[in-house]
Each structure stands twice: as structure tokens, then as C-alpha cells.
Image (cartoon, grey):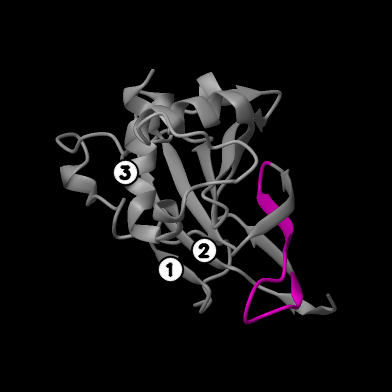
Amino acid sequence: MSASKTLTPEVLWAQRSSETDADENYLMITIGIPDCENPSVKIESDSLEFTAKSKGHVGDESSHQYHLHIDFFKEIIPDKTLHKIANGQHYFLKIFKKDLGLEYWPRLTKEKVKYSYIKTDFNKWVDEDEQQDAPPPAGFDMNDMMMNGNPDMEALKQQLAQGAGGMDLGAAGFPEELDDVGDEEEVLEEIEASK
């Protein structure tokens, strides 16, 4: 395998806000990296730094290095951040905003610049005036799977196996059905339902 230049991954994001409940005042960020390996996340009160590598595969034998830096629009609470990798294709983060308020952030970044790799996640987005009536997004309460900020892979495999008819998800990795981005929501809902 030969390494190629550093790439910027695609970022999808959505948010919720509350002026009274800190647990309902957060950002949902999905970083798309195919065959994600060795992710490294550094979260500060005003920024996110993410690096990862994707391994080569049939049709593209090269490995790729990814790097992402985001300066947030406002401050966040780094210690409360939840994160995990799912189906080898996406890195999910739930980042809590520091300031309570009903008003949404107008953008994810501090700079008022349009970045081509940052997009709205319309699968998770709810308008400000409709968020009180909307069901919570599936899959972002990851406390049961987390140990010191890292996912408990055995617990994750057991939960996924329950939704996959008890099939062994051990050394073979995730089943092919989970490779599609559209199945991401179903996997997250199954994880939530099994709690």
C-alpha cells in the first residue's frame, strides 16, 4: 500500500437547542471516512481536530490519510462529548453546546465561510420551532457502550448481533448490509432499543 495526500473528509451536521435542558442542547456530527482506521480525536472548548486513515481495498489499493479541523461557532463542553465509529464508514460525535438557548447556531464554524465538505444532515435536522415535538434522534445516547471515551466493542458486537439474528460479528467484521449509509439510522435505532 502506498500513502497518498491528506484528504478532508465529508462532514454532516445537525443540532438541537434548549434554554433549560443542557442534555437537549447539542450538535450531531458525522464524519465520513471509508474503512476508517486509527481515528484520533482532539476536542477543545472551541475546536475539533480529527485524523484517521482508511485502508486500501479492491479497486483502490492506496491508503488515505484524513485530517479535519473545525473552529466552532461558539464554545462546547469537551468532557461531555460522546463519539464512536459505526459500520467502518462513519465517525459519529455528539457534542454539547456550552451556552443554553433556543436559538440554533447559524453555522457550525466560527468563520462565516462556506466549506464544501461541511453539509447539513437533513436526516437528523429538525427546524427550531419543531424540535420540541420531534422524537429524539436515534443512536446518540452511547453511555452504555463507552469506556473512557472509547466504545466497548464487545458490547457493540453483541448489540449488533441481536439485530442481525444472532449472527457472529467477530473477526469477519460488520455484515455487508451495514455498508450502506441508509442503514446507519437502523443500526443506531437497534442500539438504542436494546438498552
- Which image quadrant is residue 61 in? bottom right
The tag on residue 11 is 2
| Mark 2 / mark 3, whichever is N-terminal | 2
| Three-letter code for the amino acid on which mark 2 is drawn | Val
| Three-letter code for the amino acid on which mark 3 is drawn | Glu
Q: CA distance from mark 1 to mark 2?
A: 6 Å
The tag on residue 186 is 3
Residue 13 shows in this picture: yes
Q: Position of residue 186 (x, y in %)?
A: 31, 43
Q: Is residue 134 rendered to the left or right of residue 73? A: left
Q: Position of residue 45 (x, y in %)?
A: 67, 41
Q: Is residue 143 rendered to the left or right of residue 45? A: left
Residue 103 shows in this picture: no
Badge 1 element: strand
C-beta proximity under 8 Å, tags 1 and 2: yes
The foreground one among 180 and 127 is: 180
Q: Position of residue 137 (x, y in %)?
A: 31, 39
Q: Which residues are magenta?
A: 45-64
Which label lies toward us, 2 or 3? 3
Badge 2 element: strand
The tag on residue 119 is 1
Q: CA distance from mark 2 to mark 3?
A: 20 Å
At x 41% / y 28%, what residue is drawn? 166
